[in-house]
Image (spheres, coloured by chain):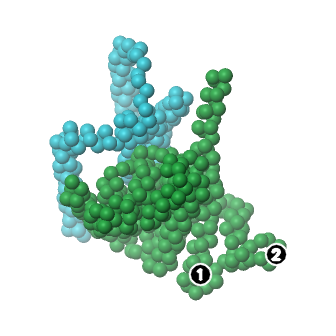
Chain colours: A green, B cyan
Amino acid sequence: MMTSSLAIIELSALLVPAIKIVALVFAVILPMVAYSVWAERRVSAIIQDRVGPNRVGIPFTKIGLAGLGQPISDGVKFLLKEDFTPGHVNKLYFWLAPALTMVPAILTCAVLPFGSELFGEKMVIADLNVGPLFIFAIASLSVYGIVLAGWASNSKYPFLGGIRSTSQMISYEISLGLSLVPVLLIFGELNLSEIVEEQSKNGWLLLPLWGEGAIWNGGWDRFFLFFPALLAFIIFTTSIFAETNRLPFDLPECETELVAGYHTEYSSMKFALFFLGEYAAMIIGSGLIVTLFLGGWSLPFGWDAALMSMAGNPEQVPWWLGVIHISTFLAKVIAFILFFIWVRWTLPRFRYDQLMKLGWVVFFELALLNIFITAGIIILTRP
Amino acid sequence: MSVLFYIFSAVMLVFGLMVVLNRNPVSSALSLVVSFLGLAALFITLNAYFIGVIQVLVYTGAVMVLFIFIIMLLDIKKEQRRDLNYVAMGGGIIVVLALISQLAILLGDFVPGNQQLATLPEGSAVHQDVKLVGEAVFTDFNFHLQLLGILLLVATVGVVVLSRRQGRADRSQQ
Protein backbone atom coordinates (compact mmCIF):
# COMPACT_ATOMS: atom_id res chain seq x y z
CA MET A 1 0.00 0.00 0.00
CA MET A 2 2.73 2.37 1.04
CA THR A 3 4.89 1.78 -2.03
CA SER A 4 2.03 2.14 -4.51
CA SER A 5 0.99 5.53 -3.10
CA LEU A 6 4.62 6.60 -3.22
CA ALA A 7 4.82 5.57 -6.85
CA ILE A 8 1.73 7.62 -7.66
CA ILE A 9 3.23 10.69 -6.00
CA GLU A 10 6.44 10.30 -7.95
CA LEU A 11 4.54 9.75 -11.17
CA SER A 12 2.52 12.94 -10.73
CA ALA A 13 5.69 14.83 -9.79
CA LEU A 14 7.13 13.73 -13.11
CA LEU A 15 3.93 14.11 -15.08
CA VAL A 16 3.22 17.77 -14.29
CA PRO A 17 6.61 19.10 -15.51
CA ALA A 18 6.35 16.80 -18.52
CA ILE A 19 2.96 18.27 -19.43
CA LYS A 20 4.34 21.78 -18.95
CA ILE A 21 7.37 21.05 -21.14
CA VAL A 22 5.33 19.47 -23.94
CA ALA A 23 2.68 22.18 -23.81
CA LEU A 24 5.15 25.06 -23.76
CA VAL A 25 7.56 23.75 -26.39
CA PHE A 26 5.23 22.04 -28.85
CA ALA A 27 2.06 24.05 -28.41
CA VAL A 28 3.53 27.52 -27.83
CA ILE A 29 7.19 27.97 -28.83
CA LEU A 30 7.31 25.93 -32.04
CA PRO A 31 4.07 27.33 -33.54
CA MET A 32 5.26 30.79 -32.50
CA VAL A 33 8.55 30.16 -34.31
CA ALA A 34 6.71 29.12 -37.47
CA TYR A 35 4.30 32.02 -37.31
CA SER A 36 6.99 34.60 -36.52
CA VAL A 37 8.58 33.61 -39.84
CA TRP A 38 5.21 34.28 -41.45
CA ALA A 39 4.86 37.56 -39.51
CA GLU A 40 8.34 38.58 -40.61
CA ARG A 41 7.44 38.07 -44.25
CA ARG A 42 4.09 39.85 -43.96
CA VAL A 43 5.42 42.79 -41.95
CA SER A 44 8.43 43.23 -44.22
CA ALA A 45 6.02 43.24 -47.15
CA ILE A 46 3.92 45.94 -45.49
CA ILE A 47 7.05 48.02 -44.73
CA GLN A 48 8.26 47.68 -48.33
CA ASP A 49 4.79 48.33 -49.77
CA ARG A 50 4.39 44.79 -51.15
CA VAL A 51 1.73 42.14 -50.50
CA GLY A 52 3.75 39.23 -49.09
CA PRO A 53 2.60 35.61 -48.73
CA ASN A 54 -1.20 35.99 -48.54
CA ARG A 55 -2.52 33.05 -50.61
CA VAL A 56 -1.99 29.80 -48.71
CA GLY A 57 -5.06 28.98 -46.67
CA ILE A 58 -7.16 25.83 -46.50
CA PRO A 59 -6.14 23.43 -49.32
CA PHE A 60 -8.53 22.86 -52.26
CA THR A 61 -10.69 25.84 -51.29
CA LYS A 62 -10.37 29.48 -52.15
CA ILE A 63 -10.21 30.51 -48.50
CA GLY A 64 -6.95 32.44 -48.09
CA LEU A 65 -6.96 33.39 -44.38
CA ALA A 66 -4.37 36.11 -45.16
CA GLY A 67 -1.77 33.43 -45.86
CA LEU A 68 -1.94 31.75 -42.45
CA GLY A 69 -1.33 28.35 -44.06
CA GLN A 70 2.06 29.46 -45.36
CA PRO A 71 4.23 28.13 -42.46
CA ILE A 72 2.69 24.66 -42.81
CA SER A 73 3.37 24.47 -46.54
CA ASP A 74 6.88 25.85 -45.91
CA GLY A 75 7.49 23.09 -43.38
CA VAL A 76 6.25 20.40 -45.78
CA LYS A 77 8.46 21.85 -48.51
CA PHE A 78 11.55 21.78 -46.28
CA LEU A 79 10.89 18.17 -45.26
CA LEU A 80 10.35 16.98 -48.84
CA LYS A 81 13.37 18.70 -50.39
CA GLU A 82 16.48 16.70 -51.14
CA ASP A 83 18.82 16.72 -48.14
CA PHE A 84 22.09 17.25 -49.93
CA THR A 85 25.39 16.83 -48.07
CA PRO A 86 28.38 18.17 -50.00
CA GLY A 87 31.32 15.77 -50.38
CA HIS A 88 33.93 18.03 -48.80
CA VAL A 89 32.33 18.41 -45.38
CA ASN A 90 33.11 16.77 -42.04
CA LYS A 91 29.99 14.56 -41.87
CA LEU A 92 29.56 14.15 -38.10
CA TYR A 93 29.85 17.83 -37.20
CA PHE A 94 27.94 18.89 -40.29
CA TRP A 95 24.99 16.85 -38.99
CA LEU A 96 25.44 17.89 -35.38
CA ALA A 97 25.59 21.65 -35.95
CA PRO A 98 21.91 22.37 -36.83
CA ALA A 99 20.74 20.45 -33.77
CA LEU A 100 23.18 22.36 -31.58
CA THR A 101 21.69 25.69 -32.65
CA MET A 102 18.11 24.57 -32.01
CA VAL A 103 18.55 22.76 -28.67
CA PRO A 104 19.95 25.63 -26.51
CA ALA A 105 17.35 28.01 -27.89
CA ILE A 106 14.56 25.68 -26.75
CA LEU A 107 16.25 24.71 -23.45
CA THR A 108 16.40 28.28 -22.17
CA CYS A 109 12.61 28.50 -21.98
CA ALA A 110 12.75 26.17 -18.94
CA VAL A 111 13.22 29.00 -16.44
CA LEU A 112 10.97 31.65 -18.02
CA PRO A 113 7.81 32.19 -15.94
CA PHE A 114 5.09 32.33 -18.61
CA GLY A 115 2.16 32.75 -16.20
CA SER A 116 1.35 33.08 -12.51
CA GLU A 117 -0.53 29.95 -11.46
CA LEU A 118 -3.04 27.65 -13.07
CA PHE A 119 -4.96 25.24 -10.81
CA GLY A 120 -2.41 25.88 -8.03
CA GLU A 121 0.51 24.93 -10.26
CA LYS A 122 3.24 27.51 -10.90
CA MET A 123 3.49 28.30 -14.60
CA VAL A 124 7.24 27.81 -14.95
CA ILE A 125 9.01 24.57 -15.83
CA ALA A 126 12.01 24.91 -13.49
CA ASP A 127 11.70 27.46 -10.69
CA LEU A 128 15.47 27.88 -10.29
CA ASN A 129 17.05 30.45 -7.98
CA VAL A 130 19.69 31.18 -10.63
CA GLY A 131 17.29 31.92 -13.52
CA PRO A 132 19.15 34.63 -15.49
CA LEU A 133 22.48 32.85 -15.04
CA PHE A 134 20.95 29.61 -16.33
CA ILE A 135 19.69 31.41 -19.43
CA PHE A 136 23.12 32.96 -20.09
CA ALA A 137 24.87 29.63 -19.55
CA ILE A 138 22.65 27.73 -21.98
CA ALA A 139 22.48 30.57 -24.51
CA SER A 140 26.28 30.72 -24.57
CA LEU A 141 26.23 27.12 -25.86
CA SER A 142 24.37 28.11 -29.03
CA VAL A 143 27.62 29.50 -30.43
CA TYR A 144 28.88 25.92 -30.86
CA GLY A 145 26.25 25.16 -33.49
CA ILE A 146 27.27 28.12 -35.62
CA VAL A 147 31.01 27.60 -35.16
CA LEU A 148 30.75 23.90 -36.01
CA ALA A 149 28.58 24.62 -39.03
CA GLY A 150 31.16 27.08 -40.30
CA TRP A 151 34.09 24.80 -39.66
CA ALA A 152 32.55 21.48 -40.77
CA SER A 153 31.35 22.97 -44.07
CA ASN A 154 35.03 23.19 -45.02
CA SER A 155 34.64 26.13 -47.36
CA LYS A 156 35.52 29.83 -47.23
CA TYR A 157 32.30 31.75 -46.64
CA PRO A 158 30.84 29.51 -43.95
CA PHE A 159 34.17 29.56 -42.13
CA LEU A 160 34.31 33.36 -42.16
CA GLY A 161 30.71 33.45 -40.95
CA GLY A 162 31.54 31.07 -38.10
CA ILE A 163 34.56 33.10 -37.03
CA ARG A 164 32.58 36.34 -37.10
CA SER A 165 29.80 34.80 -35.09
CA THR A 166 32.16 33.54 -32.39
CA SER A 167 33.85 36.88 -31.83
CA GLN A 168 30.53 38.70 -31.97
CA MET A 169 28.85 36.44 -29.44
CA ILE A 170 31.79 36.57 -27.02
CA SER A 171 31.92 40.37 -27.22
CA TYR A 172 28.22 40.93 -26.70
CA GLU A 173 27.84 38.32 -23.97
CA ILE A 174 29.95 40.61 -21.76
CA SER A 175 27.75 43.68 -22.15
CA LEU A 176 24.68 41.43 -21.94
CA GLY A 177 25.78 40.09 -18.56
CA LEU A 178 26.99 43.43 -17.20
CA SER A 179 23.84 45.31 -18.24
CA LEU A 180 21.81 42.81 -16.23
CA VAL A 181 23.70 43.46 -12.97
CA PRO A 182 21.84 46.76 -12.21
CA VAL A 183 18.51 44.99 -12.68
CA LEU A 184 19.51 42.25 -10.25
CA LEU A 185 20.79 44.91 -7.81
CA ILE A 186 17.43 46.67 -7.90
CA PHE A 187 15.43 43.49 -7.26
CA GLY A 188 18.00 41.80 -5.01
CA GLU A 189 16.77 38.50 -6.41
CA LEU A 190 17.91 35.88 -8.94
CA ASN A 191 14.64 33.95 -9.20
CA LEU A 192 12.69 35.07 -12.27
CA SER A 193 9.28 34.19 -10.77
CA GLU A 194 10.01 36.32 -7.68
CA ILE A 195 11.21 39.17 -9.91
CA VAL A 196 7.91 39.12 -11.82
CA GLU A 197 5.86 38.95 -8.60
CA GLU A 198 7.75 41.94 -7.19
CA GLN A 199 7.00 43.87 -10.40
CA SER A 200 3.35 42.86 -10.24
CA LYS A 201 3.10 44.33 -6.72
CA ASN A 202 5.33 47.40 -6.94
CA GLY A 203 5.47 48.49 -10.55
CA TRP A 204 7.34 47.22 -13.61
CA LEU A 205 10.98 48.17 -13.80
CA LEU A 206 10.28 50.56 -16.67
CA LEU A 207 6.85 51.65 -15.38
CA PRO A 208 7.02 52.20 -11.60
CA LEU A 209 3.59 53.78 -11.30
CA TRP A 210 1.81 51.74 -8.60
CA GLY A 211 2.38 50.03 -5.26
CA GLU A 212 5.48 50.93 -3.28
CA GLY A 213 7.33 51.73 -6.51
CA ALA A 214 5.16 54.79 -7.26
CA ILE A 215 6.70 58.12 -6.33
CA TRP A 216 3.55 59.29 -4.46
CA ASN A 217 3.74 56.17 -2.30
CA GLY A 218 7.31 56.96 -1.24
CA GLY A 219 9.05 55.07 -4.04
CA TRP A 220 11.80 57.65 -4.49
CA ASP A 221 14.41 54.93 -5.00
CA ARG A 222 12.46 53.45 -7.90
CA PHE A 223 12.03 56.92 -9.43
CA PHE A 224 15.78 57.56 -9.48
CA LEU A 225 16.53 53.96 -10.44
CA PHE A 226 14.29 54.32 -13.49
CA PHE A 227 17.11 56.01 -15.44
CA PRO A 228 19.79 53.31 -14.92
CA ALA A 229 17.07 50.73 -15.60
CA LEU A 230 16.28 52.42 -18.92
CA LEU A 231 19.98 52.42 -19.85
CA ALA A 232 20.25 48.74 -18.88
CA PHE A 233 17.17 48.02 -21.00
CA ILE A 234 18.70 49.70 -24.06
CA ILE A 235 22.05 47.91 -23.70
CA PHE A 236 20.38 44.58 -22.97
CA THR A 237 17.99 44.77 -25.91
CA THR A 238 20.73 45.77 -28.35
CA SER A 239 22.95 42.96 -27.10
CA ILE A 240 20.08 40.49 -27.55
CA PHE A 241 19.90 41.62 -31.18
CA ALA A 242 23.62 40.81 -31.51
CA GLU A 243 23.32 37.50 -29.63
CA THR A 244 20.49 36.27 -31.86
CA ASN A 245 22.31 37.40 -35.04
CA ARG A 246 19.44 39.62 -36.10
CA LEU A 247 19.83 42.64 -38.32
CA PRO A 248 21.44 45.22 -37.80
CA PHE A 249 23.98 42.75 -36.35
CA ASP A 250 23.59 39.75 -38.69
CA LEU A 251 27.21 39.86 -39.85
CA PRO A 252 27.69 36.05 -39.51
CA GLU A 253 25.24 35.49 -42.37
CA CYS A 254 25.69 38.79 -44.16
CA GLU A 255 24.36 37.92 -47.63
CA THR A 256 26.16 40.64 -49.55
CA GLU A 257 29.63 39.56 -48.41
CA LEU A 258 29.38 35.94 -47.28
CA VAL A 259 26.58 34.50 -49.50
CA ALA A 260 24.72 33.15 -46.44
CA GLY A 261 27.53 32.79 -43.93
CA TYR A 262 27.68 29.65 -41.83
CA HIS A 263 24.70 27.94 -43.48
CA THR A 264 25.78 28.39 -47.10
CA GLU A 265 26.33 24.64 -47.58
CA TYR A 266 23.11 23.53 -45.89
CA SER A 267 19.89 22.52 -47.59
CA SER A 268 16.46 21.16 -46.78
CA MET A 269 15.48 20.60 -43.13
CA LYS A 270 19.02 21.18 -41.83
CA PHE A 271 18.89 24.71 -43.20
CA ALA A 272 15.42 25.12 -41.74
CA LEU A 273 16.74 24.15 -38.30
CA PHE A 274 19.23 27.03 -38.38
CA PHE A 275 16.46 29.32 -39.47
CA LEU A 276 14.08 28.14 -36.76
CA GLY A 277 16.82 28.20 -34.11
CA GLU A 278 17.35 31.88 -34.82
CA TYR A 279 13.65 32.61 -34.40
CA ALA A 280 13.42 30.49 -31.25
CA ALA A 281 16.34 32.43 -29.77
CA MET A 282 14.54 35.65 -30.70
CA ILE A 283 11.34 34.52 -28.93
CA ILE A 284 13.22 33.48 -25.78
CA GLY A 285 15.18 36.75 -25.85
CA SER A 286 11.91 38.71 -26.07
CA GLY A 287 10.54 36.63 -23.21
CA LEU A 288 13.57 37.43 -21.07
CA ILE A 289 13.37 41.17 -21.79
CA VAL A 290 9.65 41.18 -21.00
CA THR A 291 10.24 39.23 -17.79
CA LEU A 292 13.01 41.45 -16.49
CA PHE A 293 11.96 44.93 -17.60
CA LEU A 294 8.27 44.88 -18.50
CA GLY A 295 6.67 42.87 -15.73
CA GLY A 296 6.48 39.40 -17.32
CA TRP A 297 2.96 38.00 -16.94
CA SER A 298 1.71 40.81 -14.68
CA LEU A 299 -0.95 43.32 -15.64
CA PRO A 300 -0.07 47.03 -15.30
CA PHE A 301 -1.30 49.54 -12.67
CA GLY A 302 -1.77 46.99 -9.92
CA TRP A 303 -4.74 45.34 -11.63
CA ASP A 304 -3.38 41.96 -10.49
CA ALA A 305 -4.03 42.82 -6.84
CA ALA A 306 -7.45 44.30 -7.71
CA LEU A 307 -8.50 41.17 -9.62
CA MET A 308 -7.19 38.94 -6.82
CA SER A 309 -9.24 40.80 -4.21
CA MET A 310 -12.25 40.53 -6.54
CA ALA A 311 -11.80 36.75 -6.65
CA GLY A 312 -11.86 36.60 -2.85
CA ASN A 313 -9.38 33.92 -1.80
CA PRO A 314 -5.96 35.66 -1.46
CA GLU A 315 -4.02 32.36 -1.50
CA GLN A 316 -5.40 30.72 -4.63
CA VAL A 317 -5.10 32.36 -8.05
CA PRO A 318 -8.40 31.63 -9.88
CA TRP A 319 -8.09 29.82 -13.20
CA TRP A 320 -9.42 32.73 -15.27
CA LEU A 321 -6.79 35.05 -13.81
CA GLY A 322 -4.12 32.43 -14.59
CA VAL A 323 -5.31 32.36 -18.20
CA ILE A 324 -5.28 36.18 -18.30
CA HIS A 325 -1.69 36.17 -17.02
CA ILE A 326 -0.52 33.64 -19.62
CA SER A 327 -2.21 35.65 -22.40
CA THR A 328 -0.65 38.86 -21.06
CA PHE A 329 2.80 37.31 -21.22
CA LEU A 330 2.23 36.01 -24.75
CA ALA A 331 0.83 39.37 -25.89
CA LYS A 332 3.90 41.20 -24.56
CA VAL A 333 6.25 38.69 -26.20
CA ILE A 334 4.42 38.97 -29.53
CA ALA A 335 4.61 42.77 -29.35
CA PHE A 336 8.34 42.51 -28.76
CA ILE A 337 8.79 40.09 -31.67
CA LEU A 338 7.04 42.62 -33.89
CA PHE A 339 9.51 45.21 -32.61
CA PHE A 340 12.40 42.90 -33.58
CA ILE A 341 10.92 42.52 -37.07
CA TRP A 342 10.29 46.25 -37.39
CA VAL A 343 13.94 47.01 -36.51
CA ARG A 344 15.20 44.42 -38.99
CA TRP A 345 13.41 45.99 -41.92
CA THR A 346 14.22 49.56 -40.90
CA LEU A 347 17.92 49.73 -40.03
CA PRO A 348 20.84 49.04 -42.39
CA ARG A 349 23.52 46.50 -41.46
CA PHE A 350 26.54 47.61 -39.40
CA ARG A 351 30.05 47.18 -40.71
CA TYR A 352 32.00 44.54 -38.83
CA ASP A 353 34.53 46.85 -37.17
CA GLN A 354 31.70 49.21 -36.17
CA LEU A 355 29.94 46.29 -34.53
CA MET A 356 32.96 45.26 -32.48
CA LYS A 357 33.70 48.85 -31.55
CA LEU A 358 30.13 49.40 -30.38
CA GLY A 359 30.34 46.30 -28.21
CA TRP A 360 33.74 46.87 -26.64
CA VAL A 361 34.11 50.66 -26.56
CA VAL A 362 30.56 51.90 -25.99
CA PHE A 363 28.37 49.23 -24.39
CA PHE A 364 31.00 47.61 -22.18
CA GLU A 365 31.93 50.92 -20.52
CA LEU A 366 28.34 52.14 -20.32
CA ALA A 367 27.27 48.91 -18.63
CA LEU A 368 30.09 49.18 -16.08
CA LEU A 369 29.24 52.81 -15.36
CA ASN A 370 25.60 51.85 -15.01
CA ILE A 371 26.46 49.34 -12.27
CA PHE A 372 28.25 52.07 -10.29
CA ILE A 373 25.39 54.56 -10.72
CA THR A 374 22.79 51.99 -9.69
CA ALA A 375 24.77 50.90 -6.63
CA GLY A 376 25.22 54.57 -5.63
CA ILE A 377 21.52 55.34 -5.96
CA ILE A 378 20.61 52.24 -3.97
CA ILE A 379 22.99 53.22 -1.15
CA LEU A 380 21.65 56.79 -1.05
CA THR A 381 17.91 56.09 -1.35
CA ARG A 382 17.51 52.80 0.50
CA PRO A 383 18.60 53.34 4.10
CA MET B 1 19.27 10.66 -7.81
CA SER B 2 21.94 7.95 -7.78
CA VAL B 3 20.95 6.82 -11.28
CA LEU B 4 21.61 10.32 -12.55
CA PHE B 5 24.94 10.32 -10.71
CA TYR B 6 26.08 7.19 -12.56
CA ILE B 7 24.83 8.44 -15.93
CA PHE B 8 26.60 11.79 -15.67
CA SER B 9 29.77 10.29 -14.18
CA ALA B 10 29.89 7.85 -17.09
CA VAL B 11 29.41 10.73 -19.57
CA MET B 12 32.19 12.67 -17.87
CA LEU B 13 34.65 9.79 -17.80
CA VAL B 14 33.96 8.53 -21.32
CA PHE B 15 34.31 11.97 -22.87
CA GLY B 16 37.31 12.72 -20.66
CA LEU B 17 38.99 9.66 -22.19
CA MET B 18 37.94 10.82 -25.65
CA VAL B 19 39.82 14.09 -25.04
CA VAL B 20 43.04 12.09 -24.79
CA LEU B 21 42.29 9.42 -27.39
CA ASN B 22 40.97 11.57 -30.26
CA ARG B 23 43.52 12.46 -32.93
CA ASN B 24 41.47 15.38 -34.21
CA PRO B 25 42.02 18.45 -31.96
CA VAL B 26 38.50 19.78 -32.60
CA SER B 27 36.98 16.46 -31.50
CA SER B 28 39.16 16.53 -28.39
CA ALA B 29 38.05 20.03 -27.49
CA LEU B 30 34.37 19.17 -28.06
CA SER B 31 34.73 16.04 -25.93
CA LEU B 32 36.07 18.27 -23.17
CA VAL B 33 32.97 20.44 -23.57
CA VAL B 34 30.69 17.43 -23.06
CA SER B 35 32.80 16.32 -20.09
CA PHE B 36 32.36 19.76 -18.51
CA LEU B 37 28.60 19.54 -19.09
CA GLY B 38 28.59 16.21 -17.24
CA LEU B 39 30.46 17.84 -14.35
CA ALA B 40 27.97 20.71 -14.25
CA ALA B 41 25.12 18.20 -14.17
CA LEU B 42 26.80 16.44 -11.20
CA PHE B 43 26.95 19.75 -9.31
CA ILE B 44 23.28 20.34 -10.05
CA THR B 45 22.28 16.88 -8.77
CA LEU B 46 23.98 17.95 -5.51
CA ASN B 47 21.67 21.03 -5.43
CA ALA B 48 24.66 23.30 -6.06
CA TYR B 49 22.87 25.16 -8.85
CA PHE B 50 25.13 28.18 -8.75
CA ILE B 51 28.39 26.29 -9.20
CA GLY B 52 26.84 24.05 -11.84
CA VAL B 53 25.57 26.98 -13.87
CA ILE B 54 28.84 28.90 -13.47
CA GLN B 55 30.68 25.80 -14.65
CA VAL B 56 28.67 25.87 -17.88
CA LEU B 57 28.83 29.64 -18.23
CA VAL B 58 32.58 30.05 -17.69
CA TYR B 59 34.20 26.84 -18.89
CA THR B 60 31.80 25.52 -21.52
CA GLY B 61 30.43 28.81 -22.79
CA ALA B 62 33.51 31.04 -22.72
CA VAL B 63 36.85 29.28 -22.22
CA MET B 64 36.19 26.34 -24.54
CA VAL B 65 34.71 28.59 -27.23
CA LEU B 66 38.01 30.48 -27.32
CA PHE B 67 39.92 27.17 -27.41
CA ILE B 68 37.91 25.95 -30.38
CA PHE B 69 38.22 29.34 -32.02
CA ILE B 70 42.01 28.96 -31.98
CA ILE B 71 42.07 25.26 -32.87
CA MET B 72 39.95 25.84 -35.96
CA LEU B 73 42.63 28.13 -37.34
CA LEU B 74 45.16 25.26 -37.16
CA ASP B 75 45.95 22.85 -39.95
CA ILE B 76 43.93 19.88 -38.70
CA LYS B 77 45.37 17.34 -41.18
CA LYS B 78 48.91 18.15 -40.04
CA GLU B 79 47.90 17.77 -36.39
CA GLN B 80 46.31 14.39 -37.11
CA ARG B 81 49.41 13.08 -38.84
CA ARG B 82 51.73 14.05 -35.95
CA ASP B 83 53.62 11.11 -34.43
CA LEU B 84 52.87 10.04 -30.89
CA ASN B 85 55.24 11.52 -28.35
CA TYR B 86 56.08 8.41 -26.30
CA VAL B 87 58.04 10.27 -23.61
CA ALA B 88 55.11 12.60 -22.89
CA MET B 89 52.70 9.67 -22.95
CA GLY B 90 54.83 7.68 -20.48
CA GLY B 91 55.14 10.72 -18.20
CA GLY B 92 51.39 11.29 -18.28
CA ILE B 93 50.67 7.66 -17.42
CA ILE B 94 53.12 7.79 -14.48
CA VAL B 95 51.51 10.97 -13.12
CA VAL B 96 48.02 9.44 -13.41
CA LEU B 97 49.14 6.23 -11.66
CA ALA B 98 50.78 8.24 -8.87
CA LEU B 99 47.59 10.26 -8.37
CA ILE B 100 45.39 7.15 -8.35
CA SER B 101 47.61 5.35 -5.83
CA GLN B 102 47.66 8.41 -3.58
CA LEU B 103 43.88 8.68 -3.75
CA ALA B 104 43.56 4.96 -3.03
CA ILE B 105 45.79 5.27 0.06
CA LEU B 106 43.87 8.29 1.34
CA LEU B 107 40.43 6.84 0.68
CA GLY B 108 41.47 3.50 2.20
CA ASP B 109 41.49 5.14 5.65
CA PHE B 110 38.10 6.74 5.10
CA VAL B 111 35.40 5.76 7.58
CA PRO B 112 31.92 6.20 6.10
CA GLY B 113 29.61 8.38 8.17
CA ASN B 114 26.88 6.58 10.11
CA GLN B 115 24.85 9.55 11.31
CA GLN B 116 21.70 10.58 9.47
CA LEU B 117 21.79 14.25 8.44
CA ALA B 118 18.75 16.38 9.28
CA THR B 119 16.37 17.03 6.39
CA LEU B 120 16.16 20.77 5.81
CA PRO B 121 12.88 22.37 4.75
CA GLU B 122 12.49 23.80 1.26
CA GLY B 123 13.72 27.41 0.99
CA SER B 124 16.22 27.12 3.84
CA ALA B 125 19.84 28.27 3.67
CA VAL B 126 20.93 25.30 1.55
CA HIS B 127 18.61 26.42 -1.25
CA GLN B 128 20.12 29.91 -1.32
CA ASP B 129 23.56 28.95 -2.52
CA VAL B 130 24.06 32.17 -4.53
CA LYS B 131 23.46 34.26 -1.42
CA LEU B 132 25.84 32.16 0.68
CA VAL B 133 28.59 32.27 -1.94
CA GLY B 134 28.11 36.03 -2.37
CA GLU B 135 28.22 36.71 1.38
CA ALA B 136 31.37 34.63 1.80
CA VAL B 137 33.16 36.25 -1.14
CA PHE B 138 32.22 39.86 -0.36
CA THR B 139 32.67 39.80 3.43
CA ASP B 140 35.08 37.11 4.66
CA PHE B 141 37.20 36.96 1.53
CA ASN B 142 36.91 40.58 0.47
CA PHE B 143 40.67 41.16 0.57
CA HIS B 144 41.31 38.14 -1.65
CA LEU B 145 38.65 39.34 -4.06
CA GLN B 146 40.30 42.75 -4.40
CA LEU B 147 43.68 41.09 -4.85
CA LEU B 148 42.22 39.00 -7.68
CA GLY B 149 40.80 42.16 -9.22
CA ILE B 150 44.23 43.78 -9.27
CA LEU B 151 45.74 40.63 -10.72
CA LEU B 152 43.19 40.63 -13.55
CA LEU B 153 43.78 44.33 -14.17
CA VAL B 154 47.54 43.74 -14.45
CA ALA B 155 46.91 40.88 -16.87
CA THR B 156 44.60 43.03 -19.01
CA VAL B 157 47.05 45.92 -19.17
CA GLY B 158 49.87 43.48 -19.94
CA VAL B 159 47.95 41.94 -22.85
CA VAL B 160 47.16 45.36 -24.30
CA VAL B 161 50.79 46.48 -24.02
CA LEU B 162 52.14 43.27 -25.56
CA SER B 163 49.69 43.23 -28.48
CA ARG B 164 50.36 46.91 -29.21
CA ARG B 165 54.11 46.36 -29.30
CA GLN B 166 53.59 43.43 -31.67
CA GLY B 167 51.37 45.55 -33.91
CA ARG B 168 53.94 48.35 -34.05
CA ALA B 169 56.70 45.89 -34.99
CA ASP B 170 54.56 44.53 -37.84
CA ARG B 171 53.93 48.00 -39.15
CA SER B 172 57.62 48.98 -39.07
CA GLN B 173 58.48 45.81 -41.01
CA GLN B 174 56.11 46.79 -43.78
Closer to the camera, A36 or B25? A36
- Residue bearing mark 1: A45
Within 10 angstroms of label 1, few (less than 14), some, or many (20 or more) residues? some
Residue at image coords 70%, 61%: A79
Residue kind at label 2, given as amino acid type: Thr
Q: Chain of mark 1?
A: A
Q: Which mark is residue A236?
A: none
Residue at image coords 60%, 33%: A10
- Residue bearing mark 2: A61
Residue kind at label 1, given as amino acid type: Ala
Estimate the x, y position of residue A170 in percent, counting from the top left. 38, 58
Q: Secondary structure at mark 2?
A: loop
Residue at image coords 44%, 56%: A196
Residue A174 visible at all: no
Closer to the camera, A347 or A17? A17
Residue A268 placement, left or right of A97: right
A304, above or below A354, in the image:
above
Estimate the x, y position of residue A356 in percent, counting from the top left. 34, 67
Residue A1 visible at all: yes
Estimate the x, y position of residue A91 in percent, counting from the top left. 59, 51
Within 10 angstroms of label 2, few (less than 14), some, or many (20 or more) residues? few
A351, above or below B29, in the image:
below
Residue at image coords 41%, 22%: B117
Q: Residue A213 is drawn in which quadrant?
A: bottom left
Q: Estimate the spatial distance between the alpha carbons at disc 1 and disc 2, rounded to whole Å.
A: 24 Å
Closer to the camera, B52 or B168? B52
Residue A8 placement, left or right of B36: right
Residue at the limit of the structure toward the right, as seen here: A60
